[in-house]
Image (tube, rainbow, N blue to C red):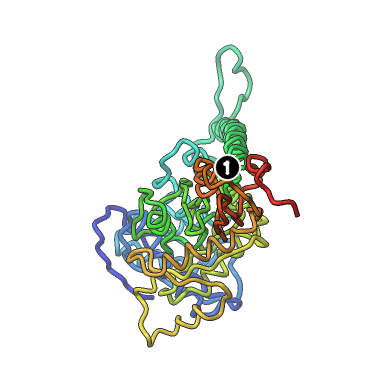
Amino acid sequence: MKALAEQIGATERVFLIGAELRKRTGADLTETMAELAELARTAGAQIIGEGIQRLDRPHAATYIGKGKAIEFAETCKQGDVDTVIFDDELSPAQTRNLERVFDCKVLDRTALILDIFAQRARTREGKMQIEMAQLQHILPRLTGLWTHLSRQKGGIGMRGDGESQLEVDRRRIQERISKLRRDLKEVKRVRQTQRQGRQRSQWPLASIVGYTNSGKSTLLNALTGAEVLAEDKLFATLDPTTRRINLPTNQNALLCDTVGFIRKLPHQLVESFKATLEEVVEADLLLHVVDVSSESAADQIASVNEVLKEIDADNKPTLMVFNKIDQLFESNGNLHWLKEFPHAVSVSAKTGEGLEELQAELGIMLRPVRTCLELQVPASDGATLARIRALGQVDEERYEGDIVHLKARIPDHAREEFARFRVPE
């Protein structure tokens, strides 16, 4: 057991508990516990200490075994702990049993992440998604939340045993979940309408994905001049933001910043955020942003790929973007990441290093969206020439007398506009 005794200016005092299972190495546990501590700080907690239990498999009743739970409970009592947070997901029964032993609030990793998401959500859509995920998490745990299960009696319509408070709350939560699902379907419909508008413009969509705090929002701001909140915190921003970018190839594209991923991302969160994550599924290209300075870069890449697989986006064309190279040194072992992925780009979204190379690679990877046309335009038709240059990517341009010969990549929706200038094949 390691006492952290960290004062971070928060009011809720927490104790962290992790289990070193036979299938999990000590290094893995160290990393996930460090991440759990960062999650707790992000939620505004004061970390009092942490404890580790080594066991073959989780105990059915208390996850870590009753003896160890009692030992940790005594430590928590001495530290005046308000909340105990477990690194793994607990069953409703385990949570109830542990709260009896610790005599305080017991949360698991899922509940902690949901709490952070609830703090970060800003838009109506984001708040609905979080509320639904929280209610889905609470529903099977209602029994432990109610100690007063006395029956309501008396009055017209209430003769007999009536409903228990537990049953009333369960029914209300189920009704609320149903309403949120209907509302999110409407959000999905609106997003589909917006997507159709984008498709009419033939602007390709690149979605930025990556582990939380890898610098996705900072990258979006640097590339497009957006003003998305970018803080050195886990899940600093949840709500998706889409902005236009004009690439060096004179091609317009859309960049969408999406919610960050994390180890053990709760399944109900993935389900709730499917309306948002559709921007990933529908994207023409994924920009997978990696914090190359992190010692956990490999695990973070694997965690992101796991979520992409869960939402059926794992086969999308992907450009690996290794961010935060300003924090690397020649002696840093993570430099090998910059060589192991084809077409990978190394950048610093903070300093701007590598952003020109990134935009050039984006132009190359999104180029198939346009059709190359060979055109002959009168030199005196300045309006058409200006239109071609504004709308397309001009690969070749030469003058022969009064005629301008061009080879230009034009969006499919605009091909007919220049049909009379096309050179017969």
Residue 123 vs 12, above or below: the answer is: above
Residue 302: x percent and y percent?
Answer: 57, 69
Say which of 355 and 289 sits in front. 355
Specify whether 81 is left or right of 121: left
Q: Position of residue 39 (x, y in %)?
A: 40, 60
Residue 142 horizontal side relative to residue 118, left or right: right
Indicate the amino acid at tag 1.
Leu
Reading the image, the residue beneath label 1 is 139
Q: Residue at x 45, y 81 (%)?
A: 334
Furthest-right residue in this view: 425
Q: Name the quarter where the N terminus is drawn.
A: bottom left
Q: Position of residue 423 (x, y in %)?
A: 70, 51
- Image quarter hosting the C terminus: bottom right
Displayed quadrant of residue 45: bottom left
The answer, for residue 177, to whether it is visible in the render is no
Q: Camera-side residue: 414 or 41?
A: 414
Residue nearer the viewer, 134 or 355: 355
Residue at image coords 30%, 64% = 78
Relative to 304, does residue 53 appear above or below in the rendering?
A: below
Residue lying at the far top of the rendered structure: 156
Decide which of 22, 367 is in the foreground and name it. 367
Residue at left offset 50%, top offset 62%? 210
